[in-house]
């Protein structure tokens, strides 16, 4: 699996991460604010909601938790005795190290993770927690939390992450009736729920094989990417598959699953 990296767009230097994050939290706040006057916020006793001012713009943030440990340092680069040797380049991404029109600001970078993520922005916050130390006090393990703010483009414009996803992934119409079923294994009991029917049921009354549509091989619920791969040919649409079947707990469910049809945006 490719590793997360931050590409400095001005110098071309890459700051790589030791391990990929377990989770990436992406938030969006639109350019909406309460209406105000010289006396403060505009409100009214007869209003159901506060009046809003649509300012445009907004803010999109990515929150990442990263792990660095000297025991996991790449080989061939000399001994690593302090984990800050590896995390210092990440800290520099939040420093005002670039001067533009006589004003200093953090460098413009891109958050890159394989083909799935390529987002331009700046690192606005970095926090580091050390929990393992050498006898001389040098930190050996770091849990780093990073806030990355997108700048310079809209998600739906060409080059934005939503635009790129639309070019690579088919659209799923969740309102259409199902066009097939996907067999899955049970919720951990070891018994199969869904999937191909038993041989006795598949045979017709005269002993001949009854015609039936092919059904994918059963897949464990824990392998959500495999479920999506079997249904759509890509491992990235498992959330749409579970949503279409009304499944709230992705760790415990049984099949078969209805497969929604692909929308008209298929390429």
Image (spheres, helix red, strand yellow):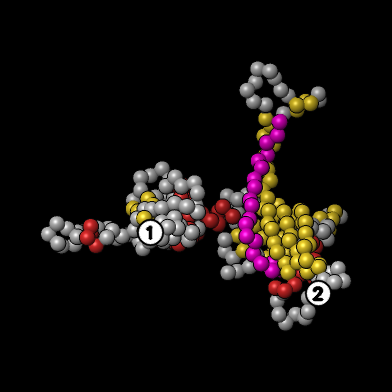
At label 1, counting other C-alpha atoms closer than 10 Å, the crowd grade (few under 14, some 14-19, many 20 or more) is: few
Q: Which residue is mark 1?
A: 191
Q: Nearer the viewer, residue 238 or 252?
A: 252
Q: Secondary structure at mark 1?
A: loop
Q: Earlier in the sequence, mark 2 or mark 1?
A: 2
Q: Is residue 68 magenta?
A: no
Quadrant containing the C terminus in the rendered view: bottom left
- Residue 67, given in percent of the width and then of the height, sits at 70, 64
Image side of residue 186 versus residue 59, left or right: left
Q: Residue furthest left?
A: 206
Dot label at residue 87 = none
Q: Residue at x 23, y 57 (%)?
A: 201
Q: Residue at x 41, y 53 (%)?
A: 254
Q: Secondary structure at mark 2?
A: loop
Please report the bounds of the magenta region as a residue range.
10-34
Q: Is residue 243 above or below residue 192?
A: above
Q: Nearer the viewer, residue 93 or 259?
A: 259
Q: Residue at x 74, y 60 (%)?
A: 144
The reply to whether callout 2 and callout 1 are in contact (CB within 8 Å) is: no
- Residue 145, given in percent of the width and then of the height, sits at 73, 57
- Image quarter of residue 134: bottom right
Task: Using the numbered discs, state the Cα–Cα distance from disc 2 to disc 1 in whole angstroms.
Answer: 51 Å
- Residue 110, given in percent of the width and then of the height, sits at 68, 60
Q: Which residue is mark 2?
A: 81
At label 2, counting other C-alpha atoms closer than 10 Å, the crowd grade (few under 14, some 14-19, many 20 or more) is: some
Q: Is residue 143 visible?
A: yes
């Amino acid at each position: 699996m490719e590793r997360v990296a931050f590409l400095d767009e001005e110098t071309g230097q890459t700051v790589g991460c030791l391990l990929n994050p377990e989770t990436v939290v992406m938030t969006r706040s639109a350019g909406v604010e309460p209406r105000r006057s010289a006396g403060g916020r505009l409100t009214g006793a007869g209003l159901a909601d506060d009046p809003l001012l649509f300012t445009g713009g907004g803010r999109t943030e990515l929150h990442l938790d990263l792990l660095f440990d000297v025991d996991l340092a790449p080989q061939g680069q000399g001994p690593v005795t302090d984990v800050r040797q590896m995390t210092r380049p990440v800290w520099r991404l939040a420093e005002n190290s670039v001067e533009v029109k006589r004003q200093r600001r953090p460098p413009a970078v891109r958050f890159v993770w394989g083909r799935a993520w390529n987002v331009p922005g700046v690192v606005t916050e970095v926090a580091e927690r050390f929990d393992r130390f050498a006898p001389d006090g040098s930190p050996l393990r770091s849990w780093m939390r990073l806030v990355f703010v997108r700048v310079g483009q809209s998600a739906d414009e060409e080059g934005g992450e939503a635009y790129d996803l639309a070019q690579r992934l088919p659209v799923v119409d969740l309102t259409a009736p199902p066009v097939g079923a996907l067999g899955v294994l049970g919720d951990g009991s070891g018994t199969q729920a869904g999937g191909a029917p038993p041989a006795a049921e598949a045979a017709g009354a005269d002993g001949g094989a009854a015609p039936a549509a092919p059904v994918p091989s059963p897949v464990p619920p824990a392998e959500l990417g495999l479920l999506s791969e079997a249904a759509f040919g890509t491992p990235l649409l498992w959330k749409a598959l579970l949503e279409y079947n009304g499944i709230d707990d992705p760790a415990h469910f049984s099949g078969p699953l209805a497969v929604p049809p692909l929308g008209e945006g298929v390429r």
